[in-house]
């Protein structure tokens, strides 16, 4: 094919010119020979009117294509009818009649059917083309939908059905594959009239049963005439599937949605079960009745879970973006990048509230300065001056400033992190991504002994593209902070702030909110650069030099605390944070809030103080996205996911594109079970910050938490190939462990520093999963992990040592103010006492535990109390009470997460599963043990419970009489524990049972 631009001749199949990369026109030809009805090539003009764009797939009737209607100049879906169906004249006649009736439906939630056509011997339907994906694919991809999303889709479907039912039209084959979700999240029902049209003998077979088996109502199965209540029944099944990821019937009766997914509200649970009543007289009788109850359930949801109605957003200009499920494409125009990103996040990643109107408050992006002198000693101030100016201007309540970490993330994403000179287009890109109203750049010159600093500010709003320039001088580097104070005042004047506003604003001198030592500040600034690049060891080394020069440098101590915590040095981090708090008066008002939140937030007994500080920060600086981020993180730390998501979303609505904001919002979504939102947030973040490790880690966490190990492997391979020298990355070891490759995981961990407590802990987890309790205990004894050691001693049967370790957990928890640590200590202590046969002592421990968790800011710590109470009741044979308590405990569990440390769900699930088994409820026991077997991260902490779930499943299936499944699970268990400690009772029992089978 010849290129229209350079006239190079390309191969026929080429889509782009090999010479100049110009897109080549699609081959277009008219049908000149008889082709099979299911073989329409791309570019063909079918029936002289429809140009085939692509094949969309195949259904029960035939293949479906996206085509361009050249007559009406619009895209349509073209569905070819299989020849064996089209050959039946009575069927063709029925199709014509039914399609004529279906065309009467005109509703936004119903896909319009255009007409039925015949071309030679080919019969085909044309209908509205919906750009999006079908609901079946969406459920398959996301596993489960959030309650808010499921309700929104169900309500739209019900509204479409209501319109059809008013016209006397019943679908009869409603299923996820017949529902399209368009790019705006709107549901559209397809194929009205098709099921009825295919009722004839030879098409559906004798008995005229119409529909898809999993979604058919009882009356349809019996061959009776179906009315609107059959559609309501099918909608109930679809709603069940959206919420649980599976269809309800695996036997004679429907499963209870809430038993599968405890987070499903009781109101929704009852609504679904009413839709699924076998007797249609007991179901909702009309779609309007169902819509009313869906609205009631929706109103009862927390605000953050509800899906607001779509409204047309008023913008200054139209923004066009493309969205694909696994890839978000940014618009070409750099100035619109962030606006489009915000729109994408609003539509696809976040509960979509209406975005606020742009604030009148200026938002400044202070970029790196250029050293235009020959004096290289000033190079430190290329980033140091913007850092100091950001800190100084950041005090203001009249404007907002992008933080230095935000600037670093933006520049890194644009491959400008090493630049200090920017073109006009560069500034437009940066302002666009950062939602900055103004950019500030500058230069440093040293002619002779004096330092000259020039600052340029440029507006990036449609009504303000002005530029202003300022010049400042000082004698030496010690005078730079005073110059920064002058810059701050001049910049405020240039932003048209009045003298009265400037005088009334927060504006402490720069030296009073940082350091009086230029050398200490330069070290601090360089340390921050290393911290943002995740080189924490180097950052710590530089910060230690800074605080040696200025022992009261609060900002340096806070950075030391953050870097130390990032590499697991919690004790050192606490010591540095104590120093930061001690000298926080020498930080800006904003930085002081930050230090206080970090300080109070480290101990659960002071969480409330941290939240009060968050509120004070937001009251002082309502537009501060950093305050929103830290407040969201604080709520996340106490598992208040609703409030965490609310504050993190507000940060995005206010224009925050800090990579950490994407990271924390994604983790919050995942912890609350909104995995589709979490993944989309990561994908959007990686479009703005390519290859950002934090966001990639959150995406990896998202995949693993859903059991998508193959996707996790692909992502990890991109930034840490296993077949290179980087294969010592501990994440590979965790991934191998999740694939039951324990020996490979242990070998990888062993390649690292054998003396490191971090890797000793990882190796001990592998040994525990292999049933090597003694080896695991020896490894853990070299660490400070008293919790895991207490558990190991408990499982080994060394009760005295287990109780000693429990006491250490309690002492440590009291010293650090950690209620969660104390809760774990009491829970394990109670389990040990139960195993010793000391039921009364266990009850007293349970009472202490109950009183403890009642005082916690994290209300979900009540799971520990309910778990221990349930185990006590189970041992006493009071199974009903035991199961009630254990179900509550399990319902309070967060979703699995590497990043948040939620890796211990299996222990709770094991208790509930065993209680079901003891009570004789084998079906629910099987369900819970299978949950343990399918856990990802949630089985890493107590890996023996994961492996033993196969042993228990063998016992369950054996009692059910399912011998093949019993043998399969016993073999799996024995294979995983082939090198386990000798004499373990489960191993001996499994061998005997397998031999008997």
Image (cartoon, rainbow, N blue to C red):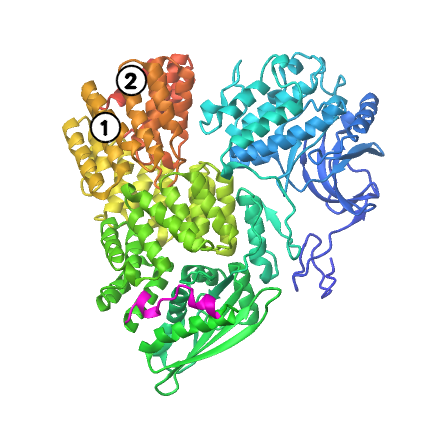
| Residue 296 image offset from top left, x and y in percent | 56, 28
149 or 910, nearer to the observer = 149
Q: Nearer the viewer, mark 2 or mark 1?
A: 1
| Residue plotted at (22% across, 64% down) | 551
Residue 326 in view in this figure: yes
In the displayed structure, would residue 65 be above or below residue 368?
above
Determine whether the residue tagged by mark 1 lies in a helix, strand or loop.
helix
* Quadrant holding the N terminus: bottom right
The answer to whether mark 2 and mark 1 are in CB contact below 8 A is: no
The quadrant the C terminus occupies is top left
- How far is the residue under mark 2 from the one under mark 1? 17 Å
Q: Which residue has dot 2 on it?
A: 873
User: Does the magenta run of residues contain 70?
Assistant: no
Q: Taking 325 as reference, is 453 left or right?
A: left
Residue 429 image position (x, y, % from top left): 55, 64
Question: Compared with residue 573, is residue 203 higher up or lower down, i.e. above or below?
Answer: above
Vertical placement of residue 6 versus 928, above or below: below
* Left or right: 133 in relation to 616: right
Q: State the image coordinates of residue 954 (x, y, percent, origin top left).
A: 37, 19
Q: Which residues are magenta?
A: 499-516
Which residue is label 1 attached to? 848
Say what secondary structure mark 2 lies in: helix
**Which label is found at residue 59?**
none
Q: Earlier in the sequence, mark 2 or mark 1?
A: 1
Between residues 224 and 319, which one lies in front from this camera angle?
A: 319
- Which of the two residues, 447 or 31, is positioned nearer the viewer here? 447
Q: Position of residue 285 (x, y in %)?
A: 65, 18
In the rendered image, the residue lying farthest to the bottom is 448
């Amino acid at each position: 094919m010849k290129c229209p631009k350079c006239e190079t001749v390309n191969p026929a199949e080429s889509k782009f010119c090999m010479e100049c990369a110009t897109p080549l026109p699609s081959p277009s030809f008219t049908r000149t020979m008889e082709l099979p009805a299911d073989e329409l090539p791309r570019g063909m003009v079918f029936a002289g009117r429809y140009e085939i764009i692509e094949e969309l797939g195949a259904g029960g009737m035939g293949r479906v294509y996206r085509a361009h209607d050249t007559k009406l100049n619009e895209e349509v879906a073209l569905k070819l009818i299989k020849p064996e169906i089209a050959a039946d004249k009575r069927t063709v006649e029925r199709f014509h009649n039914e399609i004529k009736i279906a065309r009467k439906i005109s509703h936004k939630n119903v896909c319009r059917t255009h007409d039925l056509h015949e071309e030679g011997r080919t019969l085909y339907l044309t209908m509205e083309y919906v750009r999006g994906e079908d609901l079946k694919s969406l459920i398959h991809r996301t596993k489960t939908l959030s309650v808010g999303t499921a309700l929104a889709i169900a309500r739209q479907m019900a509204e479409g059905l209501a319109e059809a039912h008013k016209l006397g039209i019943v679908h009869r084959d409603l299923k996820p594959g017949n529902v399209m979700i368009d790019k705006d999240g709107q549901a559209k029902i397809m194929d009205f009239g098709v099921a009825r049209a295919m009722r004839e003998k030879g098409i559906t077979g004798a008995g005229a049963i119409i529909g898809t088996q999993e979604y058919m109502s009882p009356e349809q199965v019996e061959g009776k005439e179906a009315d609107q209540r059959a559609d309501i029944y099918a909608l109930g099944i679809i709603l069940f599937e959206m919420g649980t990821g599976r269809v309800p019937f695996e036997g004679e009766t429907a499963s209870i949605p809430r038993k599968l997914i405890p987070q499903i509200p009781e109101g929704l649970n009852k609504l679904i079960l009413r839709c699924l009543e076998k007797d249609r007289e007991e179901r909702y009788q009309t779609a309007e009745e169902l819509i009313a109850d869906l609205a009631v359930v929706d109103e009862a949801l927390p605000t953050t879970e509800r899906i607001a109605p779509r409204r047309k957003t008023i913008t200054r200009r139209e923004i066009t973006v493309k969205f694909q499920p696994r890839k978000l494409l940014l618009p070409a125009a750099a100035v619109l990048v962030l606006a489009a990103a915000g729109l994408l996040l609003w539509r696809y990643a976040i509960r979509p509230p209406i975005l606020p109107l742009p604030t009148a408050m200026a938002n400044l992006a202070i970029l790196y300065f250029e050293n235009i002198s020959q004096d290289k000693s000033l190079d430190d101030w290329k980033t140091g001056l913007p850092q100091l100016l950001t800190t100084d201007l950041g005090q203001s309540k009249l404007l907002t400033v992008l933080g230095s970490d935000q600037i670093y993330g933006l520049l890194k994403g644009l491959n400008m992190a090493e630049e200090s000179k920017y073109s006009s287009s560069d500034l437009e890109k940066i302002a666009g991504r950062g939602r900055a109203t103004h950019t500030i750049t500058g230069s440093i010159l040293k002619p002779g002994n004096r330092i000259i600093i020039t600052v340029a500010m440029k507006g990036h709003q449609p009504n303000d593209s002005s530029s202003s320039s300022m010049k400042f001088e000082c004698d030496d580097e010690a005078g730079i902070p005073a110059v920064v104070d002058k810059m701050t005042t001049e910049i405020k004047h240039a932003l048209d702030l009045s003298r009265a506003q400037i005088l009334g604003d927060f504006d402490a001198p720069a030296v009073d909110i940082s350091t009086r030592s230029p050398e200490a500040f330069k070290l601090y600034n360089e340390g921050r650069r290393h911290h943002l690049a995740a080189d924490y060891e180097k950052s710590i080394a530089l910060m230690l030099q800074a605080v040696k020069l200025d022992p009261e440098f609060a900002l340096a101590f806070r950075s030391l605390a953050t870097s130390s915590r990032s590499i697991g040095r919690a004790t050192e981090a606490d010591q540095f944070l104590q120093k930061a708090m001690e000298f926080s008066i020498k930080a800006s008002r904003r930085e002081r809030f930050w230090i206080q939140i970090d300080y109070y937030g480290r101990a659960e007994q002071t969480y409330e103080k941290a939240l009060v500080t968050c509120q004070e920060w937001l009251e002082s600086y309502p537009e501060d996205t950093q305050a929103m981020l830290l407040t969201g993180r604080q709520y996340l730390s106490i598992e208040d996911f609703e409030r965490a998501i609310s504050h993190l979303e507000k940060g995005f609505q206010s224009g925050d594109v800090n990579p950490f904001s994407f990271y924390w919002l994604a983790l919050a979504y995942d912890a609350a079970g909104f995995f589709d939102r979490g993944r989309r947030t990561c994908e959007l973040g990686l479009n703005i910050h390519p290859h950002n490790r934090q966001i990639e880690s959150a995406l990896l966490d998202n995949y693993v938490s859903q059991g998508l190990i193959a996707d996790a492997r692909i992502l990890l391979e991109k930034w840490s190939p296993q077949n290179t020298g980087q294969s010592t990355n501990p994440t590979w070891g965790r991934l191998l462990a999740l694939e039951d490759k324990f020996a490979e995981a242990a070998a990888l961990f062993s390649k690292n520093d054998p003396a490191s407590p971090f890797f000793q802990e990882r190796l001990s987890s592998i040994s525990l999963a292999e049933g090597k309790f003694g080896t695991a205990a020896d490894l853990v004894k070299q660490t400070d992990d008293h919790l895991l050691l207490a558990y190991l001693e408990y499982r080994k049967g060394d009760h005295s040592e287990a109780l000693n370790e429990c006491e250490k957990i309690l002492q440590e928890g009291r010293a650090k103010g950690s209620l969660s640590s104390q809760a774990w200590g009491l829970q394990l202590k109670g389990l040990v006492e139960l195993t010793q046969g000391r039921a009364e002592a266990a009850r007293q421990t349970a009472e202490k535990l109950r009183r403890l968790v009642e005082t916690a800011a994290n209300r979900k710590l009540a799971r520990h109390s309910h778990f221990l109470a349930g185990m006590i009741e189970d041992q006493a044979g009071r199974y009903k009470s035991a199961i009630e308590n254990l179900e509550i405990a399990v319902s309070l569990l967060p979703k699995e997460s590497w990043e948040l440390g939620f890796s211990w769900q299996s222990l709770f699930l094991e208790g509930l599963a065993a209680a079901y088994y003891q009570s004789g409820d084998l079906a629910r026991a099987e369900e819970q043990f299978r949950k343990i077997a399918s856990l990802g991260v949630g089985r890493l902490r107590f890996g023996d419970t994961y492996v033993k779930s196969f042993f228990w499943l063998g016992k369950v299936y054996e009692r059910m009489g399912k011998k093949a499944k019993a043998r399969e699970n016993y073999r799996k268990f024995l294979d995983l524990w082939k090198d386990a400690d000798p004499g373990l009772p489960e191993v001996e029992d499994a061998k005997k049972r397998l031999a008997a089978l």
